[in-house]
Structures are given as structure tokens and as C-alpha cells.
Image (cartoon, grey):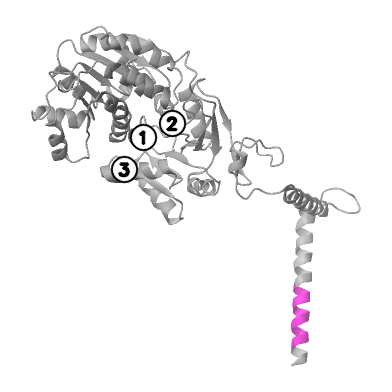
């Protein structure tokens, strides 16, 4: 590691490289093409940033291109890379969809050494001859399992075709796909696979809980969660329509929330993400594409408002919490049928258990007096005292006693045997007759007074 990079590495509190950072360091610095597989939150951005920056020469044109699946992830990566690049007098420019293209073109005229962008916008500028890639030494494909799909695979191939024949490829992902296992044929060069998922221990303990709810109860439950002190969560939905409905419903209920959707303006999306990171809102509502790869420090929870239908999607969703050794919580909303399907998709990869909301807490057992609290004790608001809990138990006992008396009333006092159907009908008729007699008697008395 270059001295300036090492000094900053230690200054910001890093002590050692994570498994993926250590495993890819030498191959990347030596110009090898690699695909790095590591869990979410294991430091993959730093894993490709530091070794590749050490190869770049200032003032020699654009030498490093990093592709990201979304505007949010591209901007997040830009912030990380720029922090290290400025130590070496290197400039970084972001080229993403949703931003002002004219300003981006003006920035490209300064010949930045590093460009970070989304495939669609990068390819558009390449086709318009505003961006030239012949000097690119290294091409990084982040979140490769998503980018190398039918939707963007062609764009990636077209971009790679514009680079030199000996360009170094660096692909990173938390999960593998059939495409990632066939990279040599896809790009026509030897690509080394480095998989540290089995030995990586950077992820903290994450509890995966199923909370059984009907669809109409889901919004109300989020309102309940909003009363837990210091609780915030990334909330996933499957469809944009659901995203808009949920955002509107929570706003109407005065719950601090914002939406992060693909059809929003770039500025609105950036604002929503910034407010969530600063703690100004409790819930960031999002779809899978918009939130892919986002790093939100110390995120307490992820909520699947709608359950995913693929293990791959579930893995990337829940990877937003429990990062870099911190504990996390995943709450899945649904009914028994939903959870059976989820279990089929996930197999034995995750241990799912039931969770409940009781006494303004999220617990993993329905028994109030013995439930183990999942949320942190010092982040609770309005918890009941032991006396209140004891009072509730006494009230339940009285209700149970009254119900028992009602059941005893349906038994014949002389024979201590349950009444037959005919006896019950006869008793009901007698009761109605007595009630009618009392009513008529009252009416006659009223007339006498008049």
C-alpha cells in the first residue's frame, strides 16, 4: 500500500484488511482480471479502490472506469473513491443517468483520471463521442450479478468493446450467477475467481423474523414501529405502485418517511437518502434496484413490506443491515402462505423465526411477561411497568372467570347435565315471554298514571 494511502487507512480507524480486500490486492496490483465474491458489507469498494488507485498516473487521461447499477450507488462509490483519490492528486467524475448531461460533458473536458457511472449514461456519451475509453487500464463492474443480466449485459459488452484489448476487468458481487461462472467466454480473457464468502466474518448477527400480518395491517404496523425510540428501517416493496401508496399512507399518518424510486428526479432521490442517513426520517421506502449496494452505517433494521420471490433478491435486501460486525434485524411481513413460499425460495440459507409487536417492542415470543426483547433496551419508549403487566393479568383472570360462569349457566342445575337443544329453545321462549310480560306491565302502569 502506498504510504499516503496507508497513513489515511490508519487515520480513519482501519486496522487490517478484510478478507476480500486482502485476497484481491496482489492480483489487482499485478494487472490480473478477477471476480471477487464476498458478503454484503465486507468492504468490496475499498477492495478495488486502493490497489487500482496505486496504478494510476496523474494527468495521463482517464485510466479507471467503474460501473454501478444505480445512480445512488454510483454517487456513494464516488464519495468513497474521491476521499482516497485526492490524496494522490487524482480527479474523479460521476457520469450517471438522471443528472445534467451538459454539466457532465463539461467535466469530461478536464480529462479526469477516474470515471464512475451507470452503464446507460456512459454508453450514451461514448456513442456521442463525448467520452473516449482507449486509455482505460481497468474496468470495474460493481454488483456484477445485477449488471450482467439481459437488461444491461449488452451495454456492458459494448462499453468493454471500446476499451483496449488488454484492459483489466474487476468484477465484484455478493452472490454468484450462471453468467459470472462463464466470464472467460463472455469477455474473451482469463478471469480469476476469488471467493471469500466461506471465511468472511465481517457480518454481525442478524435475526430474520416473520411477522404474520394481513395486507391491511401492514401500514398500521409501520406506524407502531415509528413509536420505538431511535428505530429506523429500510422498507422494501416490489412494485412502484406499492411504493407510492405506502409513501402517501405514512405521510397521511404523519410518520416521517420518504420514498426512493427509480422514476424520481435525481435530486429528490439524493435528498431522501441524505435525510435518512442523517436520521431526519425513520423509514426509507424503496425498490430493489434503487437500494442495491447502498451502505447506510449502523442501520438497525430492514423490513420486507412485500416479500421477494428470489433468494438473490432477499440476500441483497437483508445485506443492508448487520454490516461490518454490527448486529441487525430483518422483519418480513406476510401471512402463512407467503412465509411458506419464502422458505421454499431461501431453503436452509437463513433461519426464520416468528416475531411480534408487544408493549412497544419487537419480541420473539408472544408471551408478554417472558418475551425476549429484540430491540435495544435503551431505545424503548413507553414500556409498561411490572405493576401494569400484573394488572393486565388480573383483568384477564376476571374475564376468564366470567366466561366460565357463562358456560356453567348453560348446564341444568338439578341434573348437572348439558341442556338438550329442545330444552334450550323452550328456555329461550320462556325468557322472551317473561320479557314481554314485564314490558306490557310497564306500559299499563304508564297509562294508569295518565
Given residues 360 and 305, the one toward you in this image is: 360
Does 55 appear in magenta?
no
Label 3 SS: helix
For the N terminus, the image quarter is: top left
**If you read the primary sequence from the N terminus, does the residue marked by circle 1 or circle 2 appear first?**
1
What span is colored magenta in the figure? 436-446
Could you tell whether 353 is left or right of 62 in the image?
A: right
341 or 267: nearer the viewer:
267
What residue appears at the point 37 percent right and 17 percent down from the top-left corner?
Answer: 176
Residue 37 seen in this snapshot = yes
Q: Is residue 35 left or right of residue 94?
A: right
Residue of label 3: 269
> Is residue 36 found left or right of 137 in the rendered image?
right
Q: Which mark is residue 320?
A: 2
Q: Report helix, strand or loop for mark 2.
A: loop
**Magenta span has 444?**
yes
In the figure, residue 7 lies in which quadrant? top left
Amino acid at each position: 500500500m502506498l504510504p499516503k494511502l496507508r497513513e489515511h487507512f490508519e487515520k480513519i480507524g482501519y486496522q487490517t484488511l478484510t478478507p476480500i480486500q486482502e485476497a484481491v490486492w496482489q492480483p489487482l496490483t499485478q494487472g490480473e482480471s478477477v471476480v471477487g465474491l464476498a458478503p454484503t458489507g465486507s468492504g468490496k469498494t475499498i477492495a478495488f479502490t486502493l490497489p487500482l488507485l496505486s496504478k494510476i498516473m496523474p494527468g495521463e487521461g482517464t485510466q479507471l472506469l467503474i460501473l454501478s447499477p444505480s445512480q445512488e450507488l454510483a454517487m456513494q462509490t464516488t464519495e468513497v473513491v474521491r476521499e482516497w483519490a485526492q490524496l494522490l492528486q487524482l480527479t474523479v467524475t460521476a457520469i450517471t443517468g438522471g443528472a445534467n448531461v451538459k454539466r457532465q460533458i463539461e467535466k469530461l473536458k478536464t480529462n479526469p483520471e477516474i470515471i464512475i457511472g451507470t452503464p446507460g449514461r456512459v454508453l450514451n456519451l461514448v456513442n456521442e463521442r463525448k467520452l473516449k475509453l482507449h486509455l482505460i487500464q481497468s474496468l470495474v463492474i460493481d454488483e456484477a450479478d445485477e449488471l450482467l443480466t439481459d437488461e444491461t449485459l449488452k451495454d456492458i459488452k459494448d462499453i468493454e468493446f471500446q476499451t483496449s484489448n488488454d484492459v483489466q476487468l474487476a468484477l465484484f458481487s455478493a452472490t454468484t450467477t450462471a453468467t459470472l461462472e462463464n466470464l472467460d467466454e463472455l469477455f474473451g480473457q482469463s478471469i480469476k475467481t476469488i471467493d471469500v464468502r466461506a471465511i468472511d466474518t465481517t457480518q454481525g448477527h442478524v435475526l430474520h423474523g416473520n411477522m404474520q400480518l394481513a395486507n391491511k395491517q401492514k401500514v398500521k404496523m409501520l406506524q407502531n414501529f415509528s413509536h420505538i425510540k431511535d428505530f429506523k428501517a429500510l422498507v422494501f416493496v416490489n412494485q412502484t405502485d406499492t411504493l407510492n401508496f405506502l409513501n402517501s399512507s405514512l405521510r397521511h399518518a404523519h410518520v416521517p418517511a420518504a420514498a426512493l424510486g427509480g422514476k424520481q428526479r435525481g435530486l429528490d432521490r439524493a435528498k431522501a437518502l441524505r435525510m435518512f442517513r442523517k436520521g431526519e426520517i425513520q423509514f426509507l421506502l424503496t425498490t430493489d434496484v434503487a437500494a442495491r449496494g447502498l451502505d447506510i452505517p449502523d442501520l438497525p433494521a430492514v423490513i420486507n413490506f412485500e416479500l421477494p420471490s428470489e433468494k438473490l433478491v432477499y440476500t441483497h435486501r437483508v445485506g443492508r443491515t448487520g454490516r461490518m460486525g454490527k448486529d441487525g434485524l430483518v422483519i418480513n411481513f406476510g401471512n402463512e402462505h407467503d412465509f411458506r413460499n419464502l422458505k421454499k425460495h431461501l431453503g436452509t440459507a437463513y433461519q426464520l423465526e416468528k416475531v411480534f409487536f408487544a408493549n412497544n417492542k419487537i419480541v420473539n415470543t408472544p408471551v408478554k411477561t417472558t418475551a425476549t426483547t429484540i430491540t435495544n433496551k435503551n431505545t424503548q419508549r413507553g414500556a409498561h411497568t411490572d405493576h401494569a403487566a400484573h394488572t393486565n393479568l388480573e383483568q384477564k383472570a376476571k374475564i376468564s372467570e366470567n366466561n366460565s360462569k357463562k358456560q356453567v349457566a348453560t348446564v341444568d342445575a338439578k341434573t348437572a347435565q348439558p341442556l338438550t337443544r329442545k330444552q334450550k329453545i323452550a328456555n329461550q321462549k320462556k325468557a322472551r315471554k317473561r320479557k314481554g310480560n314485564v314490558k306490557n306491565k310497564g306500559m299499563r302502569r304508564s297509562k294508569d298514571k295518565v
